[in-house]
Amino acid sequence: MCGITKRVERMERTKVEEKDGVRGQHAPRGAVTNRAMTTFSPADEEKQRGVRRMKLTATGLLLFVAVVYVLAKWAQNSGAGPWAAYVAAAAEAGMVGALADWFAVTALFRHPLGIPIPHTAIIPTKKDQLGVSLGEFVGENFLSEDVVRQRLRTVGIGSRLGAWLAVPEHADRVTAELSTALRGALTVLRDSDVQAVVGEAITRRAGAQEIGPGIGKMLEKVVADGGHKRVVDLVVTRAHDWLVLHRDEVMDAVEGGAPGWTPRFVDRKVGERVYKELLRFATEMRDMPAHPARGALDRFLTDFASDLQSDTDTRARIERLKGEVLGRGEVQDLIASAWTAVRSMIVAAAEDERSELRLRVRASLLSLGSRMAAERKVQDKVDQWVEDAAVYVVTTYRKEITSLITDTVASWDAEHTTRKIEANIGRDLQFIRINGTVVGSLAGLLIYTVSHALGA
């Protein structure tokens, strides 16, 4: 009998494996996620062998009490004594208990004796409903706001994370991981896409915001603080030096602009006079802080700063000038090239372990870890952030999470799911049959004893 049972089970397993092979040839790539429920691992095979051994043990116990029952009834009919009736009653109840529990255990996975009795083969026929129930159970008992907050509050993430980050080795590890992630993100991004986004963002931002009042306030403050005077000093000094070095060019320019009918010596005299006046003006501007031209320049800049803030016409002209400048291709190329320079700088800093960027990140992590480990207020704030984030994810995507469970269970093959579950819990279920046999025998003996006593 044992050999026949093994051969039948081997044939069934061969058929299932062949079916798996056919399905595997045509299965889409997404079916890989269901491999755990459609293939048997060596551990599963070992568990299934344990189930078979327990089935044989439970069945052997059933046969044993059946033999005991037959012998006890024979002995009772042969006049062996009152004890035979007690043994027969116990054996009879043991058989009933064993058969009842066999039926209950078998009904979980298949139809007993292949007969389609209602409410049997529960797992293969009710697999999808079980998946739905499992999803609802997880959603109600694990993905509720109260459960998530209570669990995270008992963990104390803030203090634990702070103590972990306060260790220099851990801060170095986090810094290295952040640097790797940053380099990876910058490598994945295409320069052309980022340049287009940056250029469009800067242009839109600059175009949407009026710059005249801001420039006017800045210029007004610069003039009030005298910050422009250094620029004037630089300009007049360079102008003076240029005039000294380019005397002939200035005179030639003046002579070249004179009418053709004037004598050459007159043009020469006029050129010398103009050059001397320019040089004198530049020298006085350079050496005299209170030069009238400086004062006139101060008044001009003050008035211009006021017009930039309050004069409608001046502000409109500045806006038109801004639009013309932003629309030039050279400016757009400059904005776009800024991203390339920034990306190269960030990548280089992320790769260099001694760069200022990584050192500052490491120092910030150590400081943050120390504060989180020592300050209760910081711990509470971090815990609140984590709780709020987890609750948001749970409450927002609860349906998606539970549907993942439901859809995954629904995608499992009923036959393979049944075999998988039976291999993992079937051994314990066979103990139900054994316990049913033993408890049934004891219950039968007790009932017969009480009945016999009351009848006597």
Image (cartoon, rainbow, N blue to C red):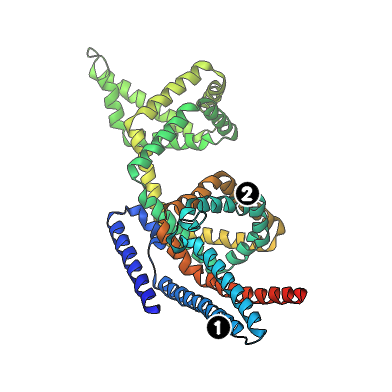
User: Horizontal and vertical percent for residue 156?
Assistant: 66, 61
Does any portion of residue 241 appear in the rendered image? Answer: no
Q: What mark, if any, has residue 56 been given in the picture?
A: none
Amino acid at dot 2: Asp
Mark 1 falls on what kind of element? helix
Using the image as rendered, state which of residue 342 and residue 42 is in the foreground.
42
Residue located at (59% from left, 53% from top): 137
* Residue neighbourhood size for the residue with mark 2, other residues' Cα within 10 Å, grouped as few (<14), some (14–19), many (≥20): some
Using the image as rendered, state which of residue 369 and residue 447 is in the foreground.
447
Q: What mark, if any, has residue 388 been given in the picture?
A: 2
Q: Identify the image quadrant of the C terminus.
A: bottom right
Q: Quadrant of residue 414?
A: bottom left
Q: Outermost residue toward the front?
A: 78
User: Horizontal and vertical percent for residue 17?
Assistant: 32, 65
The answer for how far apart the CA atoms under marks 2 and 1 are is 72 Å
Residue 84 position (above or below residue 272): below
Q: Quadrant of residue 336?
A: top left
Amino acid at dot 1: Leu
Residue located at (70% from left, 73% from top): 447
* Residue neighbourhood size for the residue with mark 1, other residues' Cα within 10 Å, grouped as few (<14), some (14–19), many (≥20): some
User: Horizontal and vertical percent for residue 6?
Assistant: 37, 75
Mark with earlier residue (2, 1) = 1
Residue 22 position (above or below residue 282): below
Residue 63 position (above or below residue 251): below
Residue located at (28% from left, 54% from top): 26
Mark 2 falls on what kind of element? helix
Q: Identify the image quadrant of the N terminus.
A: bottom left
Residue 204 position (above or below residue 82): above
Query: Would residue 320 be found to the left or right of residue 229 on screen?
Result: left
Does any portion of residue 182 appear in the rendered image? Answer: yes
Q: Which residue carries the number 1 mark?
A: 71
